[in-house]
């Protein structure tokens, strides 16, 4: 039963959806795929910058493999936000790339912790945007342009 006093609007009545939310053509799907690919590239670049910041020099193929495999490991539904599964995968992978293996464990845990921090920051900012849009019924970008 809807609460008439609630300030949160029904998302079905929030107005017209964008083309990405409601694709009308193959071009819309290609555009959405492009945004997804760009998002993955940005995520990979973030991890590369974090790795460089802690002194871990990996080439692009190694970073791409590390990001892809740890992302898949983080999807295993036995922990929250991939904690543990991402760490274990990163330790296993970096122990093959970094010598001595003991140093690989420390670097892997440090990098995984930094990735978790970025994911939490993304969640906080994403929630803030959702919260604003849900209460006003307008996209945050539209509100900022005013």
Image (cartoon, grey):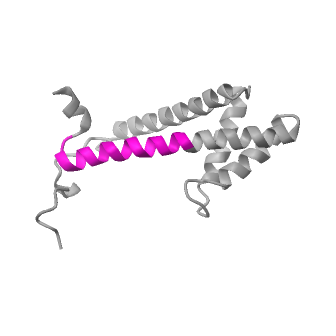
Residue 46 visible in the snapshot: yes
- Image x and y of residue 33, in percent: 45, 38
Specify whether residue 81 is painted magenta. Answer: no
Q: Residue furthest toward the bottom?
A: 1
Name which residue lies at 61% across and 64% down: 78
Classify the position of the N terminus by image quarter: bottom left
User: Looking at this view, is 51 or 39 the one in front?
Assistant: 51
Name which residue lies at 71% across and 31% down: 61
Main SS class of the magenta portion in the image: helix
Say if 101 sits above or below 2 in the image: above
User: Looking at this view, is 6 or 24 the one in front?
Assistant: 6
The quadrant in which residue 79 appears is bottom right
As drawn, is 82 to the left or to the right of 10? right
| Tag count | 0
Name which residue lies at 23% across and 39% down: 139
Say if 41 sits above or below 115 in the image: above
- Image x and y of residue 26, in percent: 36, 40
| Highlighted range, magenta | 117-138
Name which residue lies at 67% across and 25% down: 52
The quadrant in which residue 5 appears is bottom left
Specify whether residue 129 is painted magenta. Answer: yes
The quadrant in which residue 145 appears is top left
- Image x and y of residue 72, in percent: 62, 51
- Image x and y of residue 44, in percent: 59, 33
């Amino acid at each position: 039963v809807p609460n008439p006093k609630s300030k949160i609007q029904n998302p079905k009545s929030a107005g017209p959806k964008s083309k990405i939310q409601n694709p009308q053509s193959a071009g819309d799907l290609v555009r959405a795929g492009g945004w997804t690919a760009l998002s993955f590239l940005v995520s990979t670049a973030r991890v590369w910058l974090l790795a460089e910041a802690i002194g871990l020099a990996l080439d692009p193929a190694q970073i791409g493999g590390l990001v892809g495999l740890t992302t898949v490991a983080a999807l295993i539904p036995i922990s929250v936000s991939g904690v543990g599964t991402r760490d274990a995968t990163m330790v296993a992978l970096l122990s093959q790339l970094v010598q001595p293996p003991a140093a690989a464990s420390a670097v892997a845990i440090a990098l995984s912790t930094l990735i978790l921090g970025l994911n939490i920051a993304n969640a906080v900012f994403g929630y803030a945007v959702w919260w604003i849009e849900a209460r006003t019924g307008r996209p945050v970008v539209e509100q900022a342009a005013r």
